[in-house]
Amino acid sequence: MSDCIFCKIVAKEIPAQIMYEDEFVLAFKDLSPQAPTHILIIPKTHVENFLEAAQHQGMNDQIFTGIANLVKEQGWNPNGFRVVSNCGSKAGQSVFHLHFHLLGGRELTWPPG
Ligand code: AMP
């Protein structure tokens, strides 16, 4: 999608600190980190949210496989991180290209705001 900032990151038209990449997904550091570890994992294909992703065979699985590969590759402690996706503006979604936030490296409280 031509005016989507995350599509531009996928196309390498704008820079990002890429942490993981495979055929289907890209993971990069959030510009405005909310925790010592704050990575965004996105599908390379533009979809707005995970409900739309469910219409693409295997896409949500590919994202979660990418997250697991990233955590394994980085050697992060699996005891203490959170994966969250804001679905819609009322939930705080501000970029309408599906992304999962991976947050860790500090105590994470519940419920989130
Ligand atoms: P959300 O509010 O759930 O849609 O999350 C969007 C996230 O994208 C925010 O945490 C932003 O800090 C992050 N973000 C926006 N633009 C960029 C960018 N160019 N590179 C990295 N992260 C970004």
Image (cartoon, rainbow, N blue to C red):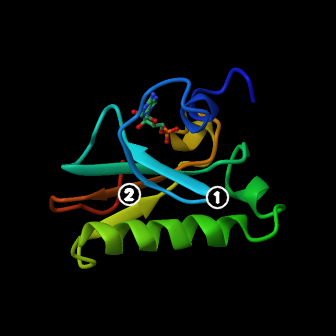
Residue most toward the top? 3
Q: Secondary structure at mark 1?
A: loop
Residue 102, labelled with which disc? Answer: 2
Q: Secondary structure at mark 2?
A: strand
Q: Position of residue 22 (x, y in %)?
A: 55, 60
Q: Taking the image as four quarters, which one is ligand 1 found in?
A: top left
Q: Are marks 2 and 1 in contact (CB under 8 Å)?
A: no
Per the model, the C-alpha gap separating discs 2 and 1 is 17 Å
Residue 10, labelled with which disc? Answer: none
Q: Position of residue 11 (x, y in %)?
A: 61, 33
Three-letter code, disc 2: Leu
Residue visible at 17% across and 59% down in the picture: 105
Residue visible at 63% across and 59% down in the picture: 23
Q: Earlier in the sequence, mark 2 or mark 1?
A: 1
> As displayed, is residue 30 above or below residue 101?
above
> As displayed, is residue 43 above or below residue 15?
below
Specify whether 51 is left or right of 106. right
Residue visible at 27% across and 43% down in the picture: 34
Nearest to the observer: residue 87 or residue 24: 24
Q: Position of residue 73 (x, y in %)?
A: 33, 70
Residue visible at 35% across and 64% down in the picture: 82
Three-letter code, disc 1: Phe
Q: Which mark's residue is nearer the viewer, 2 or 1?
A: 1
Tell me if mark 2 has few (under 14), some (14-19) or many (20+) residues whose alpha carbon lies within 10 angstroms of its own: many
Residue most toward the bottom? 79
Q: Please give the residue where the numbered disc 1 appears in the rendered image.
A: 24
